[in-house]
Image (tube, rainbow, N blue to C red):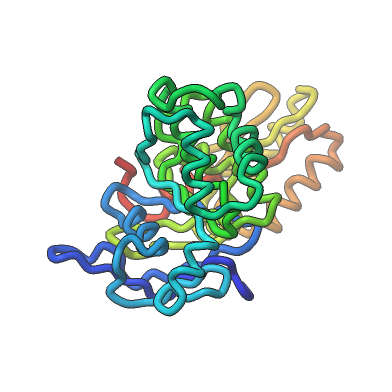
Amino acid sequence: MSNPLLAIERLRVDFPDVVAVNDLTLTVGAGEVCGLIGPNGAGKTTTMRAISGLQECTRGSVKVNGHELASEPDELKRQLGFMPDFCPTYDQLTASEFLDHFARAYDVPNRTKRIEECLELTWLTEKTNALCEELSRGMKQRLVLAKTLLPDPKVMLLDEPASGLDPLGRIELRKILLQLREAGKAVLISSHILTELSGFCNTAAIMERGRLVTFGTIAELGQKMGRRQMSVKWRADDGKALEILKAANLKNLADTNLGATFDFDGDTNVLDELLKTLVLQGVRISEWRGTGDDLEQIFLQSGAKELM
């Protein structure tokens, strides 16, 4: 990738008894949301803290929008937003006062307007004058996200941002992240909820014991992992579709209501020909997709340990 907004090269972080991050190389470009995946202790949070300058790096290079952490830490931090897991709020401040405090610290121009924009973006406008102590945990998470958005950073690091959010809050978070993608931000996000990451991530990096296991677009990783599950649905059931699928000797073929699923690990051209055969035989296909190209399947096939 040419000129990525976030570029990490051979990053290493040592603690007295463990190598937390070991030779990590990773890039995240504009309009890219990268899911950082791995079990507890894989090094995800340490990686984010190292990128933001909160954790000293043993060696390696970190650049944000072309600015090097080692030589331009202040400029790098102006381009970066970091939302840690379980970030505290100030209970005796209202939501708007909390944001105003940080807007002043960030020297945000047009503070009042920007605070209103961030409250609206995170669905907190109605809580503008509510004390932080009165907010639910999910609302506090959204308030911290609003704080992270205040200086309009080019790169955002979100460590378990869905923690404590109810189902509606998670849907709203997904909408926000899709908006950030459309705005050309580079987002590195960690989460244990892999099915949710699949809804907005276009790349993924899987870590284990401080090392990068695999990295790429969701499509690339799905192909790299090999076998995936396919799902096909049709509009009418005359038995013809299932006969064609059975004749193709597919693995783990299972009949569903007006459809079928099967495993596939061969040349994708074979899938193209199979779909063509179905259509030419008059089968009215309503769905043809790979269900194994999601992050949960990719993680399970990567060889990394289960999430904890």
Image side of residue 281 versus residue 89, left or right: right
Instruction: Give how far across and how far down residue 253 sits, in percent.
Output: 57, 36
Residue ID at (60%, 64%): 29
Instruction: Give how far across and how far down residue 208 sits, in percent.
Output: 32, 57
Instruction: Give how far across and how far down residue 221 sits, in percent.
Output: 53, 57
Residue ID at (32%, 58%): 46
Foreground: 3 or 297?
Answer: 3
Q: In this view, does 42 lie above or below 145?
A: below
Residue at far left of view = 17
Image side of residue 14 versus residue 171, left or right: left
Foreground: 104 or 225?
Answer: 104
Foreground: 152 or 181?
Answer: 152
Q: In this view, does 169 lie above or below 207?
A: above
The answer to which image quadrant residue 2 occupies is bottom right
Instruction: Give how far across and how far down residue 272 sits, in percent.
Output: 74, 52
The answer to which image quadrant residue 278 occupies is top right
Quadrant of the rendering where the C terminus is positioned: top left
Residue ID at (36%, 55%): 44
Quadrant of the rendering where the N terminus is positioned: bottom right
Numbered label tally: 0
Would residue 222 be seen by someone viewing this image from the given angle?
A: no
Foreground: 235 or 64?
Answer: 64
Would residue 236 be seen by someone viewing this image from the given angle?
A: yes
Residue at far bottom of view = 71
Residue ID at (19%, 65%): 15
